[in-house]
Image (tube, rainbow, N blue to C red):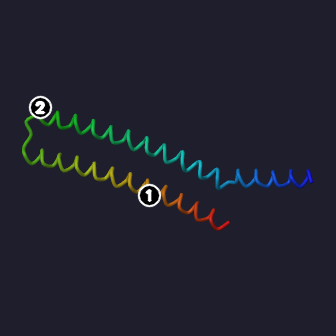
Amino acid sequence: MRKFLVAWMAVFALIGFSPSWVRAQDLKQEKQAIKLRHKTEWKTLKERQKLMKKSMKTQPLPKAERIRLKHQMERERRELSERQKDETQDVKDRQRALEESRANY
């Protein structure tokens, strides 16, 4: 009976620490790292654009140049947002695939 109990405990331990569980933990850590990186990227972009706006006010620029710079700043914000959404969606897709593969076992 004791051998049977030890064997079942070993099976449950192996199932509990399966590679899919480890991958799930890696995805969780990756999500946290992505969230932190996105936050710092936004702060950096905002600070850079704030300094650009400040320098635009101190320099006499033609209206066309100011409009071009404003469009460029907006384009940078939009591109950053889209890139971050894509990156977050990729992690969610991998997590969904991992959960589906776990459900199949």
Residue at the far top: name it.
58
Determine the residue positioned at 39% across, 44% down.
38
| x, y percent for residue 68 | 15, 49
Residue 20: x %, y % from top left: 64, 56
Pick the residue in front: 63 or 31: 31
Point out the frontmost of discs 2 and 1.
Answer: 1
Tell me the residue at 18%/50% (across/down): 71
Disc ID at residue 64: none
- Which mark identifies residue 89? 1
- Say which of 100 and 75 sits in front: 100
Between the C-alphas of marks 2 and 1, the distance is: 41 Å
Disc on the earlier residue, 2 or 1: 2
Residue 44 shown left or right of residue 50 in the figure: right
As shown in the figure, which amino acid type bears the numbered disc 2? Answer: Thr
Left or right: 59 as drawn, with respect to 83: left
Residue 96, percent across and down? 53, 61
In the picture as drawn, the residue positioned furthest to the front comes out as: 1
The residue type indicated by label 1 comes to Gln
Per the image, label 1 sits on a secondary structure element best described as helix
Q: Quadrant of the C terminus?
A: bottom right
Report the residue at 11% width, 35% height from top.
57
